[in-house]
Image (cartoon, rainbow, N blue to C red):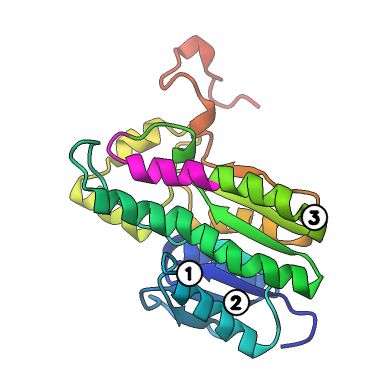
Amino acid sequence: MNNTQRVALVTGGARGIGDAIVVALQRSGSKVYSLDRVPPQASREDVVYLDADVSNEQEVASAFAEIDRAGAGIDTVVHNAGVQRSALCGQMSYEDWSSVLRTHLDGLFLCASQAIPRMIKQGRGGSITGIASTAAFVGLPGRGPYTAAKAGIVGLVRCLAVETAGHRIRVNAVAPGFTRTAIVEDAIANGSLNQDWMLERVPMGRLAEPAEIASAVSFLAGDNALYMTGQTLVVDGGWTTQGINHAPDWLQQPAGSP
């Protein structure tokens, strides 16, 4: 690794969107560490896979200490790790509620708490990106803790951006819409998600690919976004922008129109 190579940490980097982010950051020239509780589905060459629970303060601290021992510092943190628990309020256990908040929101706080002092000491700035969701902006029945956690990530990103801007540390979020991950594919297969229902609500008429979400993350982490902080990039094929699910024919562009 040369002296100018950036060092990135991706939580939840073992599979799905996280794995795609690992690949994207590698392609941009970063040395990448993945922090996850599960082994990678496909180990990426030169990626260091660390086993840790992002909701555990000591385990997060130990992971950053291991990166310290490599001696190159930390330039980029992407908090992607997450879990999902689905039930209506009044039927969901407090433990399920808490586990989602701990992983998504506490995880970002714990990673940022480790990264920010290191980035300030290094004096070369840095980038922190939280993976939010379109759930931060719309209501999803049965997914109360997930919706609350993702909205919390958007709010925390704004706060951290203001706190760290003077140190050239940029803090942003990416909010994916429906994305074709293994988890989503399994949910479609078992009937807990309906693909037709999802596609009807996405103006672009398809789900996102993980690499498309990763591209937005890589952009925010790179030099082309040096004047962006406190922002949330929504990558959802237009889902959250539409106000009418099924517009009448006279309000739709005819086929073949430019």
Placement of the N terminus among the 4 image quadrants: bottom right
Q: Return the disc, 1 or 3, that comes first in the chain's sequence.
A: 1
Q: Which residues are magenta?
A: 141-153
**Badge 1 vs badge 2, beta-carbon distance below 8 Å:** yes
Placement of the C terminus among the 4 image quadrants: top right
Residue 206 occupies quadrant: top left
What kind of element bears circle 3? loop
Percent coordinates x, y for residue 85 in the rendering: 28, 50
Q: Return the disc, 1 or 2, that comes first in the chain's sequence.
A: 1
Percent coordinates x, y for residue 170 in the rendering: 72, 55
Residue bearing the label numbered 2: 32
Please report the residue visible at 51 percent of the width from the left and 41 percent of the height from the top: 236
Q: Return the disc, 2 or 3, that comes first in the chain's sequence.
A: 2
Is residue 245 toward the left or the right of residue 3 in the image?
Answer: left
CA distance for labels 1 and 3: 24 Å
Q: Amino acid at mark 1?
A: Gly
Label 3 crowd (10 A; few <14 / some 14-19 / many >=20)? some
Instruction: Identify which residue, 58 or 51, lies in the foreground.
Output: 58
Please report the residue visible at 52 percent of the width from the left and 79 percent of the height from the top: 63
Magenta region, mostly helix, strand or loop? helix
Residue bearing the label numbered 3: 226
CA distance for labels 2 and 3: 20 Å
Query: Can residue 154 be seen here?
Result: yes
Q: Which mark is residue 13?
A: 1
The count of marks equals 3
**Quick check: is 149 in the magenta stretch?**
yes
What kind of element bears circle 1? loop
Q: Amino acid at mark 3?
A: Leu
